Image: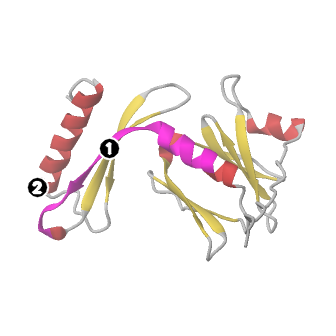
Amino acid sequence: MVSWPRRATQHPKPTLSRTELDRLGLTRQDRVLAVLESPSSELRLVITQHQLVLLPDAGTPVARPWHLVDRGSWSREDEALTVTWVDGPEPWRFVLPQPDPTALAALRERVQASVITHHDVKVAHGRGSVRVVVRQELATREVLVQTLYGQGVPAGDPVVQRAVAAAIAELRDAVGLPPEE
């Protein structure tokens, strides 16, 4: 018996009007890669080369550069995309019953493009870990180091501080950044 693969769900490519593109305020070097539309919302998530933009039908768009995205994950159970941030703002939660896989791939690729290297520092006595990440601001090519403390990890603990400082020094050296002063 021959079985045929299921036909992929067609995802019409969302388009933005000239007015919506103008509202994004993109630079000439930036361009739209994909748009995710939620059927139950008046919001769109616009994926550009340099930033992730929450575009409401009315009101001011909210743009965040890729180096501030910690991760994006789509849950089949919740039918939602959740984007978390390295600098602490509330996650963006976006209902998407059937997201366009190409748009999700673009989101993943942009986050990964901003990461140069990283190191997870295990903290003594099983207290968790600290992620040290060297990232690039995609619009300016500026290289920066981020330190992300896991839940319950005491940032002020001298043992943790020494381990994190050693990881930062190692990563800075690995990518050719000068030592911290």
Q: Earlier in the sequence, mark 2 or mark 1?
A: 1
Q: Which residue is mark 1?
A: 118
Judging from the image, what secondary structure is the residue with disc 1 in?
strand
Identity, as a three-letter code, of the amino acid under mark 2 = Val
| The N terminus - image quarter | bottom right
| Residue 108 lies in the magenta-colored region | yes
Residue 135 versus residue 7 in the image, above or below: above
Boundaries of the magenta span: 105-125
Name the spot of residue 29 as percent of width and height, x first.
Answer: 66, 23
Q: Which residue: 54% across, 62% down?
A: 90
| The C terminus - image quarter | top left
Q: Nearer the viewer, residue 57 or 36?
A: 36
Judging from the image, what secondary structure is the residue with disc 2 in?
helix
Q: Which residue is mark 2?
A: 159
Q: Nearer the viewer, residue 110 or 92?
A: 110
Left or right, residue 121 beside residue 67: left
Q: Which residue: 67% across, 71% down?
A: 79
Q: Which residue: 53% across, 31% down?
A: 138
Name the spot of residue 107 as percent of width and height, x first.
Answer: 60, 47
